[in-house]
Image (cartoon, rainbow, N blue to C red):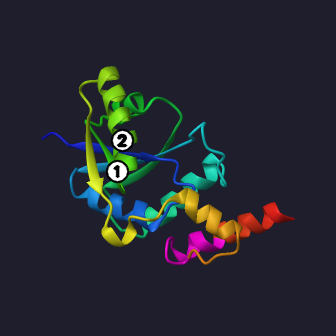
Amino acid sequence: MTIRTGVYPGTFDPITLGHMDIIRRGAKLVDRLVVGVTTNIAKAPLFDDEERIAIVRREVAAIGNPDIEVVGFSSLLVDFADAQGASIVIRGIRGVTDFEYEYQLTGMNRQLNHRVETVFLMADVALQPIASRLVKEIALFGGDIAKFVTPAVRDEVIARIGRHER
């Protein structure tokens, strides 16, 4: 019996309710879902790699699905997918801007490894506006991020930003 493995990659800085929605829904499409936590060199993360991996593991554990794992990586996505035995990359799409970026990325990945397919999941309508970048910005200006992240993530973001302000 072949196990269908998918990867859902991201920086998850911080992990949002939108990410959690894609993880839950993506897990239904595969037998094993690997949430790949990576560093995006174009972004300045609020949390370092080990912190983000630990936070994502904690949040994913709350789903209670043993077929979801969290793994850190720092390589090309298609190489990570190969290393995990994945044939599917799952990506969340909030709108047209996300689609344009993801479309280009999918084309490049396809050129690098034609065995890996990309599946786009539209974000839940209620969660479409959520972006990690905006969550951090709202928190930096003292806004309430409770609608966008879990209580534990909210507390960690606030604590981290408080450390940056001193």
Q: Position of residue 113 (x, y in %)?
A: 30, 23
Whether residue 34 can be seen here: no
In the image, is 67 to the left or to the right of 156?
left
The residue tagged with tag 1: helix, strand or loop?
helix
In reply to whether residue 138 is colored magenta, the answer given is: no
- Where, quadrant-wise, is the C terminus in this rendering? bottom right
* Residue type at tag 2: Glu
Q: Position of residue 109 (x, y in %)?
A: 35, 28
Which quadrant of the structure image shows residue 21?
bottom left
Which quadrant of the structure image shows residue 146?
bottom right
Which residue is rendered at x = 35% and y = 55% of the image?
Answer: 95
Q: What segment carries the magenta color?
A: 146-155
Query: What residue sits right under mark 2 in the picture?
Result: 100
The residue tagged with tag 2: helix, strand or loop?
helix
Task: Kindly check if marks 1 and 2 are in contact, taking CB atoms under 8 A apart as contact.
Answer: yes
Marks 1 and 2, how far apart at CA: 6 Å
Whether residue 118 can be seen here: yes
Q: Position of residue 29 (x, y in %)?
A: 21, 53
In the image, is 145 to the left or to the right of 26?
right
Above or below: residue 156 compared with residue 109: below
Q: Which mark is residue 127?
A: none
Q: Which mark is residue 96?
A: 1
